[in-house]
């Protein structure tokens, strides 16, 4: 696998699989004033990602080109590329590119905008897939139980889309795959949900500190080479804004308004600051997607507008050279 290729959340040129340990983000503050939904969409997403990976390996068909060099040859055409090409036990870069990996030139010059969505269902290998799916289970099921499948599904898909846009704007010489942008969107939504529903939570400071530390650690890991941190950042920002828009809770005591005496003062469903945050987040969300898409399909390079932004995805050291 080419050393310049990118996949979200895992290093294709390294066997270090400690990147993006979202499972530590399972901490989530609960309230007792709501019924829980039954989670089915997130498990369906997991099944879909696994199915797509199996199809990817079937199309890859390692024995056709590499025969004895394939890993786990007993799997036949589902066997993995040689580890020197892909240490994550997965397909080749060319197969990922064929099936919808995010590639700037194909999106802009060949008008293949569908790659902005398709890439979030592809994974570079078994290790990459397992890490992301475990993270999705830990984060997504809890959110779906709290807020239902419609809102969580929208956050997941739109965050992944937002991550793809930012990635394509700044990384234009490599391909990128993975659900990490969507997962960061769920983390961002957890943070904004805590902020916008601040008044109904107990242990606010502990909850906020926990989430901030988890998010900061995962974003910091993204500065390693061959990790698409722009997809992480774009997904996080989209999810953070979507949380203000989609994850509003009524203020404490509103649900019991029917039990109050007729002359009692009834609270409004939401506080004023919640409406303000909802409006500001919606405006920023629409503006961000619009500007990002316009810049992308005009063929602009985000690095031309921000000379230091490349450090957000990789910081060169004596141990590695970031290249692109």
Image (cartoon, rainbow, N blue to C red):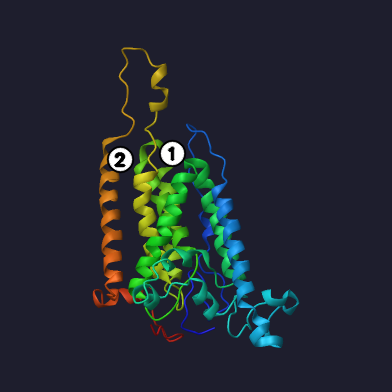
Q: Residue 143 versus residue 312: which sits nearer the camera?
A: 143
Residue 26 placement (x, y as % from top left): 53, 52
Q: Is residue 261 above or below residue 275?
A: above
Q: Secondary structure at mark 1?
A: loop
Q: Earlier in the sequence, mark 2 or mark 1?
A: 1
Cα distance between the residues tagged 2 and 1? 18 Å
Q: Residues within 10 Å of mark 1 (few under 14, many from 20)?
A: few
The C terminus lies in which quarter of the figure?
bottom left
Q: Residues within 10 Å of mark 2 (few under 14, many from 20)?
A: some
Visible in this render: residue 314?
no
Of circles 2 and 1, the one toward us is: 2
Q: Is residue 272 above or below residue 58?
A: above
| Residue of label 1 | 202
Horizontal placement of 322 versus 286: left or right? right
Horizontal placement of 280 versus 218: left or right? left
| Rendered residue at 44%/46% (across/down) | 151
| Residue of label 2 | 274
């Amino acid at each position: 696998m080419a050393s310049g290729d990118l996949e979200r959340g895992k290093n294709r040129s390294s066997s270090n699989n400690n990147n993006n340990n979202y499972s530590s983000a399972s901490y989530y503050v609960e309230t007792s004033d709501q019924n829980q939904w039954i989670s089915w969409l997130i498990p369906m997403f997991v099944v879909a990602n696994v199915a797509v990976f199996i199809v990817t390996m079937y199309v890859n068909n390692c024995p056709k080109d590499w025969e004895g060099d394939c890993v786990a040859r007993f799997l036949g055409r589902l066997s993995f590329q040689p580890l020197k090409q892909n240490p994550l036990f997965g397909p080749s870069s060319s197969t990922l590119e064929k099936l919808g990996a995010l590639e700037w030139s194909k999106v802009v010059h060949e008008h293949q905008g569908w790659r902005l969505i398709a890439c979030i269902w592809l994974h570079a290998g078994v290790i990459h897939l397992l890490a992301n799916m475990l993270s999705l289970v830990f984060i997504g099921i809890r959110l779906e139980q709290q807020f239902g499948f419609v809102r969580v599904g929208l956050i997941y898909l739109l965050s992944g889309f937002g991550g793809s846009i930012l990635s394509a704007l700044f990384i234009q010489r490599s391909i990128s795959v993975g659900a990490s942008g969507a997962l960061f969107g769920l983390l961002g939504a957890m943070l904004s949900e805590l902020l916008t529903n601040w008044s109904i939570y107990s242990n606010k400071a502990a909850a906020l500190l926990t989430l901030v530390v988890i998010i900061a650690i995962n974003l910091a890991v993204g500065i390693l080479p061959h990790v698409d941190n722009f997809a992480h950042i774009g997904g996080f920002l989209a999810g953070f804004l979507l949380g203000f828009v989609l994850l509003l809770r009524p203020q404490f005591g509103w649900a019991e308004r029917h039990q109050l005496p007729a002359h009692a003062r009834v609270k409004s469903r939401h506080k004023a600051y919640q409406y303000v945050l909802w409006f500001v987040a919606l405006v920023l969300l629409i503006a961000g997607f619009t500007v990002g898409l316009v810049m992308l399909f005009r063929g602009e390079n985000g690095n031309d507008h921000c000379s230091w932004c490349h450090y957000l995805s990789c910081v060169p050291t004596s141990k590695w050279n970031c290249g692109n």
